[in-house]
Amino acid sequence: MLIVLSTLVLVLIFLGVINARKTRIHIPIMTTAFLVDLALVLYIELNRGAIEQAVDGVGGLLLFHILVSTLVLVLYIVLIALGLRVYRDKPHLIVWHRRLAYVFIVGRLVNYVTSFYIV
């Protein structure tokens, strides 16, 4: 079930990216992707204790996955804040929004791939 939801998030991100110039489509799609991803993280934390595992010194791939996942969540928040500023009154910030979006997409794909190896 988690993989299905994670795949759904990737599909939503893809749809959001291809509709980036259509803000009435892009914003709700990306917001939905963020909320589903956040719900996944909360579910995993509540049911598996991911943060406790990381603190207890779990190494290797799981630690890398947790770090990438954290970066992705931070980038979601930064991209939402930056995107809202672009939408409202700072169109010149679109350059930074796009640059960070590339980093976010790579991070989310890495998160997805590594999730298959840590289950």
Image (cartoon, helix red, strand yellow):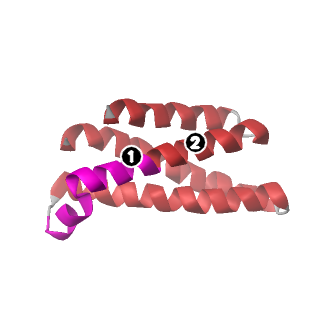
Magenta-drawn segment: 38-57
Residue at 46%, 57% in the rendered image: 73
Residue at 52%, 30% in the rendered image: 11
Image-based side of 72 in relation to 98, left or right: left
The quadrant the C terminus occupies is top left
Q: Quadrant of residue 30?
A: top right
Q: Closest to the observer: 82 or 25?
A: 25
Give the vertical position of 76 relative to 55 (above or below): above
Identified by mark 1, the residue type is: Leu
Residue at which label 1 appears = 40
Q: Position of residue 44 (x, y in %)?
A: 29, 50
Q: Secondary structure at mark 2?
A: helix
Q: Position of residue 85 (x, y in %)?
A: 76, 62
Image-based side of 8 in relation to 15, left or right: left
Residue at which label 2 appears = 32
Residue at 41%, 34% in the rendered image: 5
Q: Position of residue 56 (x, y in %)?
A: 14, 68
